[in-house]
Amino acid sequence: MNRAYNFNAGPSALPLPVLQKAQAELVDFRGTGMSIMEMSHRGKDYEAVHNEAVSLLRELMAIPADYDILFLQGGASLQFAMVPMNFLPSGRKAGYILTGSWAEKAYAEAKQFGEVFEAAGTKSENYRRVPAAGDLSYAPDSAYIHLTSNNTIFGTEWHAFPDTGAVPLIADMSSDILARPVEVSKFALIYAGAQKNLGPAGVTVAIVRRGLLEQANAGVPTMLRYATHAKDNSLYNTPPTFGIYLVGLVLAWIKEQGGVDAIHKRNKDKAGLIYDAIDKSGGFYRGHAQQDSRSLMNITFRLGSEDLEKKFLDEAKKAGFVGLAGHRSVGGCRASAYNAVPVEACRALAQFMIDFQKSNG
């Protein structure tokens, strides 16, 4: 089997054992004579898969009992609207911490539904870092504070989350959920598109404190209420059943690897291989993020010229590396080393970078 070195930013790599298990069960799911894609979401066979995924996520993230786990659709982009629709009441303001393009999109969407403000931001520094705790500014009666835990385009990540006290903290963790341990109780709501660390595109996970649900605005359309999905275990309407099945397989794989602590250690090792190639290049490669804000998931860097970057990307593609071009809005290069990207792929990329510098330095 000739597998690419997959550094795509999303949809991204899935664990090979997960793909192989899904392949083996695709036509006849566990002796039922049907694919899971053909089953009723109300039947006991699918219900068992659904509930196992919920249980595994609760176990792996140590999610407290007073939080509901929801499987939704629409990606993080729909969450940008659902959050203020549900939790930004008239007469209150919500704070957004701007650390990159996706945080900007969440902020812009929230403006459609109520009053919002910038609680902190680093746009003036081209998003090379996340704000320090002392940079945040917000009133104690703010409806909530929203942050993006990892910034895929600029390659920065929160290494320690702010303590917002009685003000609910809401996080978009689409690109680093389950990449490291997180104390869920610090957050009133965590949401994440699945297509980077959890499974295929088409599933969105939301982890919401029931106390926040009780404060939700009235008059929100039924399908856009978190409470609708919490009440019916994410089965109010037909969920993305095959995607949830794959999320469950990925969660089981993470557990088999030793859980989130083991995954975190491996992610640090993987990112370290590539950052070392950057740091020891004498400026041939230039990392975008400040060292104290570097992401374990998205390693962003530039070379000396756009022509040299093009040559680097062309040669990398010929060598079997996929997805190394930076986001179209910023250019440069980016290696997305999500959970399922093997250590061997990162080691191979680091060696390729060293060899390319020798040939072109």
Image (cartoon, rainbow, N blue to C red):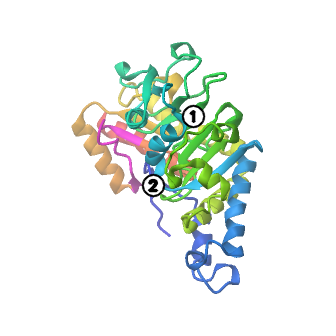
Callout 2 amino acid:
Pro
Where residue 166 appears, as percent x and y from the top left, is 66, 23
Q: Quadrant of the C terminus?
A: top left
> Residue 174: x and y, percent?
52, 44
Q: Is residue 196 visible?
A: no
Question: Between residues 202 and 111, which one lies in front from this camera angle?
Answer: 111
- Which residue is situated farthest in the left direction here? 307
Q: Main secondary structure of the magenta part?
A: loop
Q: Position of residue 87 (x, y in %)?
A: 55, 36
Residue at the spot of label 1: 170
Q: Which residues lie in the magenta part?
A: 320-334
SS for dot 1: strand
Residue at x 52%, y 31% (from the top left corner): 146
Residue that lies at the very extreme toward the front in this rendered image: 219
Q: Could you tell me which residue is drawn at 38 percent across and 55 percent down? A: 319
**Three-letter amino acid code at disc 1?**
Ile
Residue corresponding to mark 2: 11
